[in-house]
Amino acid sequence: MKLQKSLRSIIKIGLVAGILATVLFQGVSATPGVLPSPSTLSLSTSSHDAFAKYQTITYRATVTKPGKLTHIIMTLPAGATVANPRSSSGTVAAYKPGQIIWKPAAPINVVAGSKLGIPVVGINYNQSGNSNLWLVGSDSVGEVLAYARGDFLLNNTSSPCQPTGNSYIRTENAKLGTPKAQWQIDPTAFVPTTLSGFASADSYKCGDVAYFKVDSQLTSFATAKVYRMGYYGGTGAREIWSTADSFLSGKQPAAQVKSSTTTPAYKNMADASNWNNNIAIRIDGRFTPGTYLTKFTDLGGRATYVPFTVRDDTGFKHDFLFQQATTTWQAYNSFGGHAFYTAIPNQASRLSFNRPYSGVAGLGSGEFLQLESGMVYQLEKEGRDVAYWTDTDLHSRATELPSRTRTLILPGHDEYYSAQMRLALDKAINGQGINLVSFGANQIHREIMYNAGNRTFDVKGAYSLTSGTQYKNTTFRVSGGSKHEQAILGAQYGCGGHGDVTTNNSWIWHGISTGVGTKIGGFINGEADYQNVLERAYGLGTPVPVPIGNTKLQANIPLQLCRIGGEAKIADIVARTTPTGSRVFSGSSFAYGCFITKSCLSTWKEGPRINPTSEPIAKFAPLSISDTDSADAAIVVNNVLYWAQTGLHQ
């Protein structure tokens, strides 16, 4: 009797004048019939968290009567709702409160014993406890072909948001890490044309929900694991969250390429905001502030990372704030066929965060793995009081910088800045008492303009470019000498290349392996900065003055393959103290972090040219980082951070 009552809204029995009546209910036909005994309803889900959002439930049942299956009605867990639900093999929609209805593209001939498997994504859970769910599959006249019941349990596994304090890095890194073999992706498994994804934001705070859009071209399902990046006894990461079972991924529509002549005009923006959400993760108390990689894996073993950052918005002021260079990641991101560096006329003047990162070196992480992860590893190995945010946070939360940190750290390559971001740094070091440490090169160089919502930005001047020689017009330097990055950092971008360091008696080298005269091959790599005292860089503006304040050259390193105006250039490592007492360090190399973890790009070189008189093309030895080189790089980083915080030399 209870069964008949619970299904009465779906299958109604009517007898009018001795004739069997068909009852239409919201477009679904139902006719009287005898309900079979229920078979077992097998249920799996991407998360058993009682408050998880946008999850997948897969309903599995057995057909008990042959016929043409036209629709299946399923119940939801108690309190659950749906938001834009989807299924892989048909359409699904909300039906009645607590119920959803699935329809195939065309009626399906089924026989007794056939197995049904209906995945539904877009289910929001809202309470814990056990629910007895049911599934009824019928033909066009309501004859029941399958009926099954099963229990579905949700548990409150979330952790409340807590104030971080200033020692949370030590507490976090005392926890057991995840073996590298589990969290790292084999480069051969990274195929962004078949599996890729992106998050709904660059950064989140505790209490937010992170939504992910995933494109899986070859399989309909994927799994997800989220790792916090750090030291963790040398493993480099710790698993924080994972799917309980696979979620529904599947094919997404092609990314759009957009252009507009309406002011502000832009061209060739690759954007995948037309993709559907596939899964969401609640950022709760388990997600301590830090940098995170979500590893998505499809059923064929292909894998990709999707990065995001968790900010500390609890009000604590930390010794260090590490800024992730997400605008620069996007400028170099060619997903959809268009990046800022794509050859004209296919160059993008507007970049979108609403798309995956396609670079092979980053495996979907942007430039995090190759240029930032090593510094995160070192900061957390030392137990530094460090918090994290992104370029977009500096743009949108510029006024919060003095309340968040005493020293802002820029990573290996943080090139693309809005006027608001640059102004925030200028104010920070010239009146707000904030120190600035750049463990990188080619920083604060090109000017961008964020658009509404901060999910897209324009590279200033890029829309009008007609040749690569005009790239200089996209920099801050076109506004004159005071806008050169040297006015903040004490040095400015010169060119790409590499150079071998021979250490001098500067305090930055104190404590390294063999003291003064130690050679560190290829420590200057990627790109390099120099002090521009007399030149007109790019032929623009007025001669650039050395920044006001106590600017001191710590090292100058000859570079290979770097000439400006026919003159061979050097890399200058500088440190300065502003008139207001802030300390600024400019490292002039991409290599600080990756030297520590011995994870620099395989294309980097070291040493002088091989056979310089006989080789028509410059050839160099591949970069080789010894354990001693790695240890020396860590010592340099520690020396710089100690000076930034205290003004003293170790």
Image (cartoon, rainbow, N blue to C red):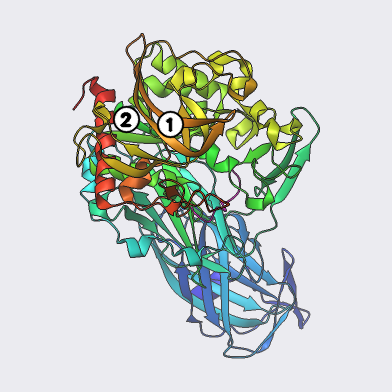
Identify the residue at horizontal 42%, vertical 38% (top origin): 205
Q: Quick one: quadrant of the C terminus?
A: top left
355 magenta-colored:
yes
Please name whichever residue, 376 or 601, is drawn nearer the observer in this view of the structure.
601
User: What is the number of the mark on residue 571?
Assistant: 1
Residue range in magenta is 353-361
Identify the residue at horizontal 62%, vertical 54% (top origin): 276
Q: Relative to 255, say whether 91 is above or below.
A: below
Q: Nearer the viewer, mark 2 or mark 1?
A: 1
Crowd class of label 1 (few under 14; some 14 to 19; many from 20; radius 10 Å):
many
Q: How many marks?
A: 2
Q: Is residue 83 left or right of residue 434?
A: right
Q: Marks 2/1: CA distance?
A: 26 Å
Image location (x, y in percent) of residue 516: 22, 34
Q: Is residue 598 visible?
A: yes
Please name whichever residue, 185 or 536, is drawn nearer the observer in this view of the structure.
536
Q: Relative to 600, say whether 411 is above or below.
A: above
Which mark sits nearer the N-terminus, 2 or 1?
2
Q: Is residue 219 left or right of residue 362?
A: right
Q: Which quarter of the figure has residue 331?
A: top right
Element type where label 1 sits in the image: strand
Q: Relative to 94, say whether 292 is above or below.
A: above
Identify the residue at horizontal 36%, vertical 8% (top origin): 579
Image location (x, y in percent) of residue 604: 45, 49
Image location (x, y in percent) of residue 576: 35, 18
Circle 2 is placed at which residue position? 320
Classified by dominant secondary structure, the portion drawn in magenta counts as: loop
Residue type pointed to by label 2: Phe
